[in-house]
Amino acid sequence: MSGGIGQHRGVQVNDLLTDLVGWIDTLSPAVIYIVLLAIAFGENVLPPIPGDLVIVFAGYLVGLDRLQFFPSVALASLGGAVGFAAMFLIGRRLGSAILAPDRFTWLPKQRLSRGLDEVGRHGYWVVLVNRFLPGLRSVISLSAGMSAMGFWRTMLASAASAVIWSWLMVYAGKRLGENWEYVGVIIRKYSEYFIVVLALLAVVRIVFYVRSRRSGTADRSQNHVNNA
């Protein structure tokens, strides 16, 4: 049953993407830029929006000389950064109330809890790479707000992440041309490995923390013996 639901949702997303790019393809360049900005923003609020592939499609249009490279990157980055900021402020405003089982039932609570764990372990670093975490990026912004992280440092990290990611997506669309949709396959494959790398980094940090605590305890014990 769950596989069927997941497959059905995947079909819906693919249909949405097909409809979106088909519609975007009929627009003038000026309107496409506005749509690109809006979708990059809306992806943070409504994660089912296939924002990444729309940005890649914009890169494909860059390759056709219908759009310009740097304005496309700039608007996609701006939309992503502002969308992150909006969700961050919502997370800060609502706090732990978001996790209440009888409230905001439409939110993915399990992924949100995981986002809080990642923010707690990696701090601003996970914000810096949030665009590279398709399965978690929609909740990292809320989690960062709930964790009361510094606003400007968080915004700087999220903006840097948005710029790097948008540049890569537009460039990939431009280079792949008619095969631009293949980027979706690449994103799904690499994101699994990226999450594994984050988990390994967390383990390494824990090991170093435990070792430093033990070393500090041993040094204090030795000093106590020497003083005695």
Image (spheres, grey):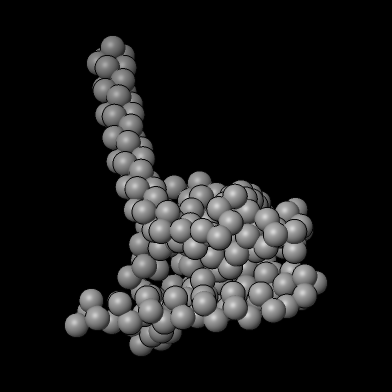
Image height of 102 relative to 138, above or below: below
Q: Is residue 64 visible?
A: yes
Farthest residue, direction right: 30
Left or right for 98, reference 51 = left
Image height of 222 relative to 216, above or below: above
- Indicate the quadrant containing the C terminus: top left, top right, bottom left or bottom right: top left
Left or right for 130, reference 65 = left
Q: Is residue 90 visible?
A: no
How far across and down, in percent of the image, does residue 52 sit? 54, 63
Farthest residue, direction bottom: 102
Image height of 139 relative to 160, above or below: below
Name the residue at 68% across, 56% down: 63
Q: In the rendered picture of this protein, how many numbered marks are placed on residues? A: 0
Name the residue at 36% across, 54% down: 189
Seen from the viewer's position, the closer of residues 68 and 216 is 68
Left or right for 45, reference 198 = right
Seen from the viewer's position, the closer of residues 184 and 83 is 184
How far across and down, in percent of the image, does residue 86 sit? 62, 71
Name the residue at 55% across, 49% down: 128
Farthest residue, direction top: 226
Q: Quadrant of residue 5?
A: bottom left
Name the residue at 62% across, 68% down: 40
Seen from the viewer's position, the closer of residues 28 and 41 is 28
Q: Quadrant of residue 1?
A: bottom left
Q: Quadrant of residue 13?
A: bottom left
How far across and down, in percent of the image, does residue 12 sit? 41, 82
Left or right for 191, reference 20 = left
Seen from the viewer's position, the closer of residues 213 and 183 is 183
